[in-house]
Amino acid sequence: MTRIKIKRAYEKPEPDDGFRVFVDRLWPRGMRKEDFRYDLWAKQIAPSAALRRWYHEDMPGRWEEFGRRYAAELRQSPAVAEFVRQVAGNDTVTLVYASRNALQNHALILQDYLVKVMSVMTV
């Protein structure tokens, strides 16, 4: 089964990161392209621009609802199934995100969602 980790874009890549997937729609602020290592930029599975803007208006107060809405977007997105097919053969996949908030960011929700989806696939 594929192990799914998360890591901030500004953290140094490690050999055990495996297949690194950048999961934001926007490029990380202040990051030069030649300094950022990723194997795939999966913009299509990031939260929609409207959802991201809504969440950023009141991040602490909207965290739980953001999680529900983002999970709903993931369930409805045909891009998620294609993404799962792309990464399923890797031992480790690291979801790389740019948010400063390590405790409340979309990569956590995506990680949880993918673990559930991929565990069902391997049964």
Image (spheres, grey):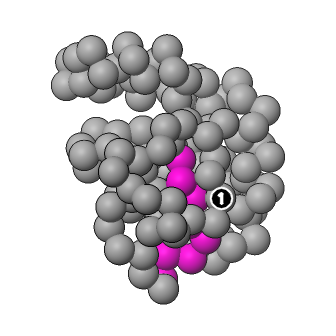
Q: Is 95 placed above or below 56 here?
A: below
Q: Residue furthest bottom?
A: 15
- Residue 68 visible to the viewer: no
Q: Which residues are magenta?
A: 16-23
Residue situated in front as seen by the camera: 82 or 100: 100
Whether the magenta-drawn stretch holds residue 11 is answered as no
At 72% from the left and 29% from the top, the residue drawn is 77
The residue depicted at 42 percent of the width and 81 percent of the height is 14
Q: Is residue 20 magenta?
A: yes
Towards the viewer: 16 or 36: 36
In this view of the protein, can residue 18 be seen by the observer? Answer: yes
Location of the C terminus (image quadrant): bottom right
Question: Which quadrant is home to the N terminus?
Answer: bottom right
Q: Quadrant of residue 119?
A: bottom right
Q: Position of residue 96 (x, y in %)?
A: 46, 57
- Please provide percent x and percent y for residue 121: 76, 55
Q: Position of residue 63 (x, y in %)?
A: 30, 26
Mark 1 lies on residue:
40
Tell me which residue sits at (80%, 46%) in the image.
Answer: 82
122 is higher (above) or lower (below) than 90: above
Q: Does residue 87 lie above or below 114 as drawn?
A: below
Q: Residue furthest left?
A: 60
Question: How many marks can you see?
Answer: 1
Look at label 1 and name its amino acid.
Leu
- Kindly indicate the quadrant of the structure image that contains residue 61: top left
Q: Nearer the viewer, residue 5 or 26?
A: 26
